[in-house]
Image (cartoon, grey):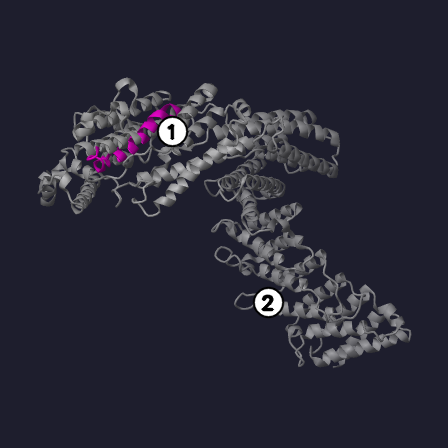
Amino acid sequence: MFTDSASIILFAIKSTIKLGQQARKAYVDSTRRREIILPLAHYFSSPSHFDALDYFNNSNFGKKYVEGYSLDGQIYEGSEELKALLEIPVTSLSEEQKRRLGILHVKYVNLDRARNGELMWADNTGINGDEFEAVFTVGQWRSGADPTPSVLHRMAGTLIEIGVDYAVNSPDLYDINSKKGKAIHSFFKGLENIDFVETDISELPARLFVATIETIEESPDLISGDLKTQELIKVTTGSISKNVAKKINAINNDRTLDVFGKRKARLRVQDWGTLLYRSTLSSGGRLVMSAPSTFLNTKDADDAALISSVGNAVLDLILDGQDGIDDLISREGLEVVISAALKTIGEHPGILADISNNAIKTVISELARELSSMENLLTPDILPEVVRMTLEKSGNNIELFWPEYADNPKKNLMLVAAKRTLTILSRPPEDNDLWKAQFTKTDLLEVTECVLDELVENPGWLITKTNELSETMGEVLSATVDVLRKQDTNRLNSSTGVEIIRAVLKTAALRQEFVGKLSNGKVVITAAVDVVLSEIFKKEISSKASWQLLRTEVIKGSIEIAMEKLLVSGLDQDAIDTLEGCLKTRIQAIDSGDTGFLESFSKCLTDRFSNS
Amino acid sequence: MKKNPNKLKRISRIYSQLVFVFLLIGFMSGCPSTGGISSINHLREAQVAFNESAGLENKIRLSGLNPFEASDMKGAVGNTVTIKNGYASALISINKIYPSQKEQLAEDNILGHVLFLKAVSQWRTGSFENALNTAKEAKKEAGDQLYPRDSAILTALSGLIKIDLAYKHIQKFTRIKEYIEDKEKLKKYLMDNSLIPEKEISTEMLNDVTILNKHFLQRIRGRLVTHQNNEDAVSDLNAARKKVDSEHEVNLYLIQAQLTAYRNYQVACQHILSHGPGTDDKALIQAREHLNELKKLCDYLKSPESTNLIAYWRDLCRI
């Protein structure tokens, strides 16, 4: 095992030189053997009236159509028009007569061809040039006789050399009977069937090799050495390599990119491909152990097992999707996304059954688009966590929250709720707002998770009969944030704000009347919050009262008590007035020496609501 | 001994970053230890440009049209520009690496391919003499680096050029009737267009169009299809075929090139004799053999296009 940075540097230099040399040789090889389309020299490809005359005068070709012929016992008369045309000296033929000859030529050649079961001449008497491109596309060596080593062959030699160096420090890595040895063997099996011939894959195998070794070293518990783990490595290696190779090919053939652009794009593909490979291996290990048949069964000819489908979906999204999405997913965040997606899909493999990968891609890209459009969002890197929550919570009741994942993947109620929550929370304070604190990354994630949890636990009040997300949740959340914004205080930090929002959301689910409206148009529950906060933060209260009230636990406790006690009230304007009355009297009592505000406030509400 | 995961992670990260940085430096910038790849990238650009032009040219031609004659199809001018630009672009890319990086290319064993691509690009841009010189240079400078396909095509190049020239000459010759009344103009036309060399032009020929026709047809025949002195295109292409295994796919191309030689000879006969080659014409018999060889090779290679390809040449050339 490497134990110091100096060893690592030396090892990296040696590896790089070896890999660089072999990668370059492989690149040169592939260029030398590359197929070339060979152009034909100039020839008269358009048949003329001379050809028509030759055809009709040739007994092996069209003469029978002039003289008549018998076929399958049936006699066919010769064409009188043809006879007449053929009697005219060629130099005396008019343009119209030449044209007629051409038409009859095509007609009878097509008759011959139809009888032979061959394709017809096109109108212009030629053939479809596209069909024959393969005939003129010629490799350097005849099939099966290419003497140069394949790219993988070249790289494999070097990989072995590097591996030997590595093995000096970690000897069990290459013992075929060891767990690590089996894992490495699976890696090479995964690369075995990939056609890298025409792809400048450069250092991809080396990167994946190093990633495999590192994952084994970092997560020895995951590498159990059994067949499932070996299959995981093999399938992931093969599938992600193929996808990366395909993308590199597309870049190489992209005429809109110059050399530098192509180089940059190739590096980006390999960079993300390697990261996704690592994430899939490290996230997939435990999942594969728990449900090997689900994750490792291949679904199509490309060996796209479930375990690698997610990685490829994310790779497609990052590399082919909207611009800037990679800025939203930190490299660490990838593992969160992959892990959550695998877990959800593992529980509901049907998500990928119908329209490959689209459902997962849609969730990620929709959230990414939403986050990108939030100009004031300070922490766009929350995307992976929000994706995780959305997918995991969806998995709790897929039929309810994501019923049309195949046909309409955007209709994911968790996705809609998360987007709505983030939009409300990221709304910037307006000029007349008094409380201007911004929600932090943790705040956003906490509220989002709380909203999604509420959806899971109390779907009744948040989902309409038509299975849409109710507007109520957004209204309550928005109104609560509005109430917070109008508090003229600097004693309320964003995390207390989040606690208040959580209390509101949890309470709102308990009685439908909480989200009803008062005669002044205010939502009951937010009106209650407004009363509590306004009284606590009132400028006129004494310093003695402030001292006791403006503590986080008191603010939070006041809200919680208010919510709890209101449950047994009529949830109307009287209840709000009662709440206000209790607050005022108990705050005044502090000046008179009351030191237990929360207890007395609670008692006041209990007494008054039980008497009402 | 219990491993420290944080330390391990840190070391792994350092390693990854180092590998990435070193690979970037070593592989991409072309340091002496690994050699540069910019020359290879230029070569690959040339390949792509060449292939695009060749693919388009073949496609149009096989559709029964002439990619360089505007009267044949709408947009032919655009095609001509596209095709010629592609070949020119290939030459530009090659000129960036040859001869300036000749030694590196030779060290990479790819000089032969570079010269092959240069020669065929010159051929398709009409620089026939330069193309032949480049082919010679390739054999001289990189003979040991010429691999089967490239070697065969370079050998075939003289034959391919003869087919191109014959095509051009046949087209020009069909216009001699415009000059037939004026012997001086006729002689000048024949010489200016290299239809017949000055030393071969006789008074009899200028006075009797039948003699002129016969002489021209003999010249065309000699350039395209007879084995006299092995100077015809078909012989050049035969020599090229001998350079590779008989099963090599390049033979599909070379045999079809031989059929194009026959096709041009056939059209010359039609214009001069008012009919194609007679049934006893050795060129026709030879073309028939070539078609059979093409069919056998297609069958051997299990080429899915074989039936239609054979029918195409059979019906175009009536062989």
- In this rendering, is residue B53 above or below B262? below
Residue placed most toward the observer, B32 or B76? B76
Instruction: Pinpoint the chain carrying mark 1.
Output: B
Task: Let me know if residue B43 appears in the view.
Answer: no
Chief SS of the magenta region: helix
Locate the C terminus of chain A and report the quarter of the image it occupies: bottom right
- Name the outermost residue toward the top: B229
Q: Which residue is mark 2?
A: A460
Residue A87, which numbered label?
Answer: none
Q: CA distance from mark 1 to mark 2?
A: 82 Å
- In this rendering, is residue B229 above or below B313? above
- Where is residue A496 shown, x and y percent of the image? 76, 63
The magenta-colored residue range is B153-182
**Is there one chain holding both mark 1 and mark 2?**
no
Image side of residue A140 versus residue A524, left or right: left
Q: Which residue is mark 1?
A: B128
Q: Kindly identify the amino acid type of the residue bearing the numbered disc 1.
A: Phe
Q: Kindly identify the amino acid type of the residue bearing the numbered disc 2.
A: Gly
- Where is residue B163 shown, x and y percent of the image? 31, 29
- In this rendering, is residue A34 above or below A270? above
Q: Quadrant of residue B201?
A: top left
Q: Secondary structure at mark 2?
A: helix
- Where is residue A382 shown, x and y percent of the image? 66, 54
Image side of residue A431 versus residue A304, left or right: right
Residue at the location (76% across, 77% down)? A579
- In this rendering, is residue B69 above or below B301? below
- Where is residue A104 shown, x and y percent of the image? 17, 44
Q: Secondary structure at mark 1?
A: helix
Instruction: Pinpoint the chain carrying mark 2.
Output: A
Single out the mark in the foreground, 1 or 2. 1
Q: Are marks 1 and 2 in contact (CB under 8 Å)?
A: no
Locate the N terminus of chain A and report the quarter of the image it occupies: top right
